[in-house]
Image (cartoon, helix red, strand yellow):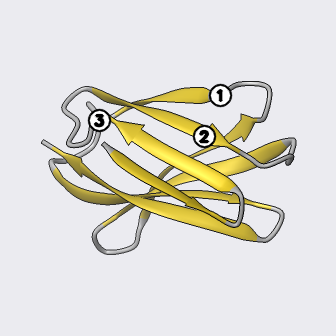
Amino acid sequence: ESYLRANGLILELSPNPASNYTLVKYDLNGAKKALLSVYDIRGMKVFETEILSDRLSFTLDTRQLVKGPYVVRLSTNGMEKSVKLLVN
């Protein structure tokens, strides 16, 4: 499980490492929406979606991702938080 809180944003991944999916739990600290992005080890964006504050989680399907390390990034209103994700 990976967890990060700073600038009022919360970003948590569970399970981590992940095989089929990881549950992305978040708190946008008052923002109405945010961008959730996934980057591979080379920094290439492999997934992106808009998430809304009225939902507290998002299920990220990791089956289409190649095994290895990734960075999951949450960004909104000039704030940004990142957590490492291992897909196995």
**Residue plotted at (42% across, 59% down):** 83
Three-letter amino acid code of the residue under disc 1: Leu
**Mark 1–mark 3 distance (CA, rounded to whole Å):** 23 Å
Residue 56 - label: 1
When the figure is inspected, residue 8 is found, relative to residue 62, above or below; the finding is below
Would you name the residue on which mark 3 appears? 64
Which residue occupies the foreground of this view, 59 or 7? 7
Q: Quadrant of the C terminus?
A: top left
**Decide: marks 1, 3 in contact (CB < 8 A)?**
no
N-terminal of the two: label 1 or label 2? Answer: 2
In the image, taking residue 66 as reference, residue 48 lies left or right, namely right
N-terminal of the two: label 3 or label 2? Answer: 2
Which residue occupies the foreground of this view, 31 or 37? 31
- Neighbor class of circle 2 (other Cα within 10 Å; few <14, some 14-19, many 20+) is many
**Mark 3–mark 2 distance (CA, rounded to whole Å):** 22 Å
Three-letter amino acid code of the residue under disc 3: Gln
- Neighbor class of circle 1 (other Cα within 10 Å; few <14, some 14-19, many 20+) is few
When the figure is inspected, residue 72 is found, relative to residue 26, above or below; the finding is below
**Residue plotted at (41% across, 68% down):** 44
When the figure is inspected, residue 70 is found, relative to residue 42, above or below; the finding is above
**Residue plotted at (60% across, 50% down):** 10
Residue 58 lies in quadrant: top right
Residue 80 lies in quadrant: bottom right
Would you name the residue on which mark 2 appears? 26
Q: Tag 2, which secondary structure? A: strand
Three-letter amino acid code of the residue under disc 2: Tyr
Measured from the top left, where is residue 84 in percent x and y?
34, 59
